[in-house]
Amino acid sequence: MLTYSMRRYLGAVTRRLQVGAGEQGRRGCADSASARDDPEHTRTLLQLCAARHFTAGEPVDRESVLSGRLGYGPLGTELKKNLLRQWWRSVVASRAEVLGISSPHQCQGRPASGSLRLVDGEALSSVLRQKGLSTEGLAREVERTLRESAVLRTTLLPGALDQYMASLELVNKKLPFGLAEMGVCYLPPGGHSPGAEVTETSLVWFCSPRTAAQWLDYWVRHRLQWWRKFAVGPSNFVSADFEEEGDGGVERAVRGARLLYHFPWGPEPLETLRSLGDRELLRTHQGSKAKLQCLDGRRCVVPHVVSVSGNMDRAMLAYLHDSLQQQKRVDSRQRLHHRKVLKLHPSLAPVKVALDMSRGPTVELRQVCEGLLQELLDRSISVWPGYLQTLPSSLEQLHKKYDEMGVLFTVLVSEATLENGLVQVRNRDTTVREMMHVSEIKDFLVKYVTESTSD
């Protein structure tokens, strides 16, 4: 296991080698990275997300996405749900020592500086309408109203710290263990940002003081591997160590790492890991030091905290950026065709299968589609019922639409299906079309989706 200092040393060496490589490295990567380094790639992606209902409303700019000021359409909602499901599966469902929790949206403990508050507008108006108050008196009344208002959480960490003591019985007071949560947090206004709400994930890991550094290293490696698992270009997901100075030199420095994605405009953090020591836990439960102790072998110690906090809205943008591929081809008539496809990982793709039908006896073909649709839904495979579309579309238009939606497979029911039971199946990633008997479709898709989404 690499120590923190060794990882910093290797990181510094790597950066020097990268600088020394200079233009040679850039020339070698020019062809593969040109699309991702082009701002047009971002504009194309945001337009596609609006057109294909990943985001709600008109195309938005990247600042709105990064700050959490946007709504999601049906496909974006499903993508986000799949991402959160995979996070929960990796951090909680596959580990006996991690417990899931849920905490109130109102801030627990001491509110952070600049936190957002829920203010009763009528109560505030009543204060402002009072007559005979001096300027100082009015200020006091306004401050009192604000103090009595609820403070919205800016992070999930306080909720886990608050539930620490209640969780000790479930783990027999043995280290290590963790508390995990997913939920909305509210970012206060800052700079030109009016504030926003983001969906965060949080793992708060309680461990022995003597192993805290090793556990931080472990979780950095584990989380980076998880982010890369779903990526088309894993090398765009990287880690960077940091160290934050303590408050006025009294408190110890906080060290940690950020897991970043290299967007065309530069790296943005997706997940932040910090080794917090026992400071935050003691601050949350003042006067209860003896009750905070857990068993570390035969010793009783106050555990140290390793915090893992992720921004899932930014993570969605990262995976959409990572998956968008723009391709060009010339057909037999020398016509240039542009193909845009979201090669989202099968675990994340919001729609696994699109069901459509060609021209023919409409009623009979639709009945076949409806029967196949129900079979797939019964096996928890998400399906897009394209056969319900009333406007006629060419096969090329259908494939274009489904590629931009990130659909893994397109199943086309035709007259041949009524005659011999064969349907056409097209793979998104290879564009290969093959004929398959309708009775084999369900098992084929269930096996593919199951194998591709398993660890």
Image (tube, rainbow, N blue to C red):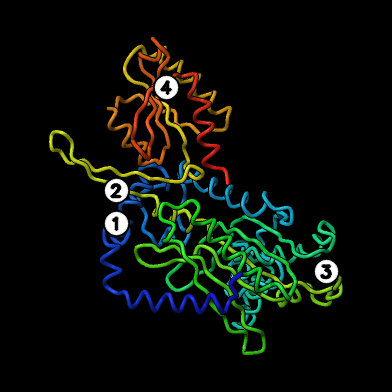
- Give the residue number, with chain letter if any, for mark 3: 297
Res 35 → quadrant: bottom left
The dot on residue 35 is 1
Disc 3 from disc 4: Cα separation: 59 Å
> Which is in the foreground here, disc 1 or disc 3?
3
* Three-letter residue code for mark 3: Gly
Q: x, y percentage for residue 203?
A: 65, 61
Local crowd size for mark 1, using a 10 Å CA cut-off: few (<14), some (14–19), many (≥20): some
Q: Identify the secondary structure beneath mark 3.
A: loop
The quadrant of the image that shows the N terminus is bottom right
Q: Is residue 279 left or right of residue 88?
A: right
Q: Position of residue 385 (x, y in %)?
A: 44, 28
Q: Which quadrant of the figure has residue 188?
A: bottom right
Q: Which residue is mark 2?
A: 326
Q: Of label 1 and label 4, which has the lower sequence position? A: 1
Q: Amino acid at mark 2?
A: Gln
- Which disc, if any, is residue 436? 4
